[in-house]
Amino acid sequence: KDPWNHMIKKWEIQSIKKTVWPKKYCTVDEYLFKRQDGKLTKWYIHPGDGVVIIVALTKKGEVICIKQYRQGIDMIDLGFPAGGVKKGITPLQSAKEELEEEAGYISKNWECIDKRARSSGTSNSWQYTYVALDCVEVGQKLEDDEFIGVEYYSIKEVETLIQNGTMNDMGCAYSGLLALKHFNT
């Protein structure tokens, strides 16, 4: 048994100062917590409605991947269609919109296979992994600042791309591994 378990207590939120650093894709809220030892501590949390990552298969069983420049790592990266959960709509509806927007595909066969905290110490949002099957091409609907290529791989090739580090985004890699396990069950 872990000798520290009896000491772990939930901290109490004393106050929240909303949006101390507003930007288009990122805001940070300043929380003031009363810790389990009674001391006050400021903590900075990225709020959000969550993100969706879509592992989609064409009717031929090909995995739909996207390739785009990723500013944070300053490189072109391979991943899956993904995006933020938009205010006022469900994660599933956001996933459907992102698949059509970024990859140019739609599907009638959707399943959410996972929901996890994005970064439980610094964010209050969730990552939803969706699988979309029997996808039909309808054409991309890219936003003005999106430049995305679509590529197709077998399930085995995707597993290799994740394992060899070709897919760098942790969220995409994790969602891909979950989807591969889901496809093989």
Image (cartoon, rainbow, N blue to C red):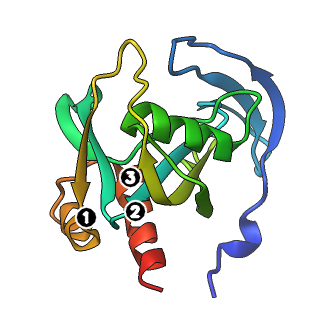
Q: Percent x, y for residue 14? A: 84, 31
Q: Secondary structure at mark 3?
A: helix
Q: Residues within 10 Å of mark 2 (few under 14, many from 20)?
A: few
Q: Is residue 166 left or right of residue 121?
A: left
In contact (CB < 8 Å): disc 1 and disc 3: no
Camera-nearest label, 2 or 3: 2
Q: Is residue 35 left or right of residue 112?
A: right
Near-viewer residue (124 or 57) = 57
Answer with mark 1 or mark 2, whichever residue precedes in sequence.
Answer: 2
In contact (CB < 8 Å): disc 2 and disc 3: no
Answer with mark 1 or mark 3, whichever residue precedes in sequence.
Answer: 1
State the mark number for residue 158: 1
Type of amino acid at the residue the image marks with label 2: Lys
The image quadrant that residue 2 belongs to is: bottom right
State the mark number for residue 123: none
Q: Is residue 1 above or below residue 93?
A: below
Q: Residues within 10 Å of mark 1 (few under 14, many from 20)?
A: many
- What is the distance, in whole Å, between disc 1 and disc 2 at their CAs? 17 Å
Type of amino acid at the residue the image marks with label 3: Cys
Camera-nearest label, 1 or 3: 1
Type of amino acid at the residue the image marks with label 1: Val
Q: Percent x, y for residue 102? A: 40, 34
Q: Residue at x 77, y 28 (%)?
A: 88
Answer with mark 2 or mark 3, whichever residue precedes in sequence.
Answer: 2
Q: Secondary structure at mark 2?
A: loop
Q: Residue at x 76, y 73 (%)?
A: 6
- What is the distance, in whole Å, between disc 2 and disc 3 at their CAs? 22 Å
Q: Secondary structure at mark 1?
A: helix
Q: Is residue 137 above or below residue 29?
A: below
The residue singled out by tag 3 in the image is 172
Q: Percent x, y for residue 147? A: 28, 23
The residue singled out by tag 2 in the image is 59
